[in-house]
Image (cartoon, helix red, strand yellow):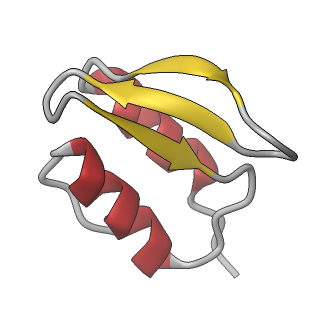
Amino acid sequence: MAEYEKQVRKKLTENGCYLLRHGKGDHDIWFSPITKLPITVDGKIVSRHVANGIMKRAGINWHF
């Protein structure tokens, strides 16, 4: 089973997104300068659909 968490964080960083704060549990709150929206990133992303949803909310044209 693939884990997408490291790849998602790498793509977010490459596109100028940054960590705002740590959320509850293993979630982190990132900010996208592209969409001007906060993004919740789980500490363990095992679904490519969830990873693609994060990319879409961040305004990044990337698909897993």
Quarter of the image containing the N terminus?
Answer: bottom right
The residue shown at (66%, 53%) is 42
Residue drawn at x 63%, y 73% is: 2
Number of marks in picture: 0
Residue 48 image point, x, y percent: 46, 76
Which sits in the foreground, 24 or 46? 24
The part of the image, by quadrant, that contains residue 34 is top left
Q: Residue at x 54, y 17 (%)?
A: 20
Q: Quadrant of the C terminus?
A: bottom left
Q: Is residue 4 left or right of residue 56?
A: right
Specify whether 50 is left or right of 53: right
Q: Is residue 17 left or right of residue 34?
A: right
Q: Is residue 1 above or below residue 52?
A: below
Q: Where residue 59 appears, x then y in whole percent?
A: 16, 45
Residue sitting farthest toward the right: 25
State the image coordinates of residue 52 (x, y, percent, origin top left).
34, 67
Corner quadrant of residue 29: top right
- In x, y percent, where is residue 58? 26, 43
Q: For residue 45, which quarter of the picture?
A: bottom right
Say if 33 sits above or below 64 in the image.
above
User: 23 left or right of 38?
Assistant: right
